[in-house]
Image: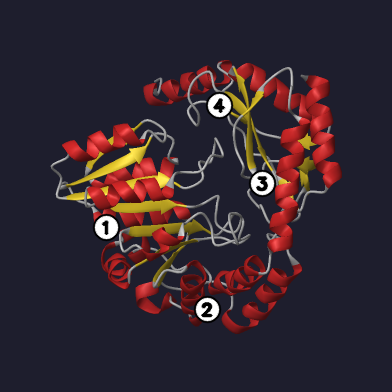
Amino acid sequence: MTFAALSRLQQGLAELKADHLERRRRLLDGAQGAHVTIDGHRVISFCSNDYLGLAADPALLAAAHVALDVCGVGAGAAHLITGHHRYHEDFERAFARFVGKPAVLLFSTGYLANLGVLTALLTKKGEVFADKLNHASLVDAAQLSGATFTRYRHVDLAQLEGQLAASTARDKLIVSDLVFSMDGDIAPVDALLDLAERYDAWLYLDDAHGFGVLGDGRGGMTERARASERVIYLATLGKAAGVAGAAVAALPDVIDWLVQKARPYIYTTAAPPLLAACLLESLRQIEAGEARRERLRQHIEALREGLAGLEHGTLMDSDTPIQPLLIGANADAMRLSGALLQRGLLVPAIRTPTVPANTARLRITLSAAHSSDDVAKLIEALHAIA
């Protein structure tokens, strides 16, 4: 007997392949870095979020070795049982001091943090106001919260204000990526805070791609946002911080509420404490990392200058390490990505549903671990194949 549900899955997979939307995992051997071995081939990687080159930094490796002897590998329990280690606590306190917020809660991943915050703060009596280009985890979190889910056009503050003014929800929450992961542009933080104050709303900022990179490393929060009781700030720790997890920073009462109500925090085993020990070292490296950030800025400037006038593709407006080259059709983006790989350059093609239809792109991400020669090779290759 034919298994109909399986047949539908197989048909769906065939359709994805025909539309150039099939995804495959690549196999990494060795440590993350600017030069990696992928599927058995040595390449220059322009697709990692390891913006400061900390993922394999010797100082973080040394911290891991020390912590391993102290706490072993697994946490062994949820945070509210016996899994909350001294390393977790020390990191939360250090992160709060660094970003200028009074209290912090450490989650195992950014996805879990977003699910935890939105579902804990909102009920059916609430409403989420979300930028249309927010990360998928924020979309899922808003839908799972049970609140009314209202989306506004990308950075369209006039539309957002109209939605806020029309809302009768008891609790309102504006949520936005701080650096948009597929476009690389930066949210207008103070303008969003103006609206939050005017319409009595929370402002939740997901700074996955800005923490460690923007400003002095503390991310994209403005000083006004740091001081605001309305602002809840998230930084993921597997990107520029080079490790894993996510930190949510807010008022102590907000953090206490999350401890009581955030189900993805309560009902999961704590992250290995040795990772928190590595994160403590990562914070020290980020705070002292202006040379890394300057090198990253130089790479961004060189890439943008070098790709000016490129015949095929448009470099989107971004001052961050995320430099998307807009191509258009899925097939064309895949072809260019494949041509670069033939030259030893790993640059992913981003397609629907991650980005809107007909906006497929090469998502170039730069790292302080890249050399100027690495960036020059990418520029030369793009001109040659375009």
Q: How far apart are marks 4 and 3 (CA)?
A: 17 Å
Kind of residue sitting beneath label 1: Ala
Q: Residue at x 44, y 21 (%)?
A: 7
Report if the CB atoms under discs 2 and 4 are less than 8 Å apart.
no
- Residue 204 location (% of width, % of height): 36, 53
Question: Relative to 125, is 270 on the left or the right?
Answer: right
Could you say whether the residue bearing mark 2 is in a helix, strand or loop?
helix
Q: What element carries label 1?
A: helix
Q: Residue 120 carries which label?
A: 1
Give the quarter of the figure containing the C terminus: top right
Q: Label 3 vs label 1: CA separation?
A: 31 Å
Name the residue beneath numbered marker 2: 87
Q: How far apart are marks 1 and 4 (CA)?
A: 32 Å
**Coloured how?**
secondary structure
| Mark 1 vs 2, N-terminal side | 2
Left or right relative to 243: residue 38: right
Q: Earlier in the sequence, mark 2 or mark 3?
A: 3
> Residue 289's quadrant in the figure?
bottom right
At which x and y percent is residue 141?
34, 46
Numbered tag placed on residue 351 in the rendering: 4
Left or right for 27, reference 174: right
Which residue is tagged 3?
48
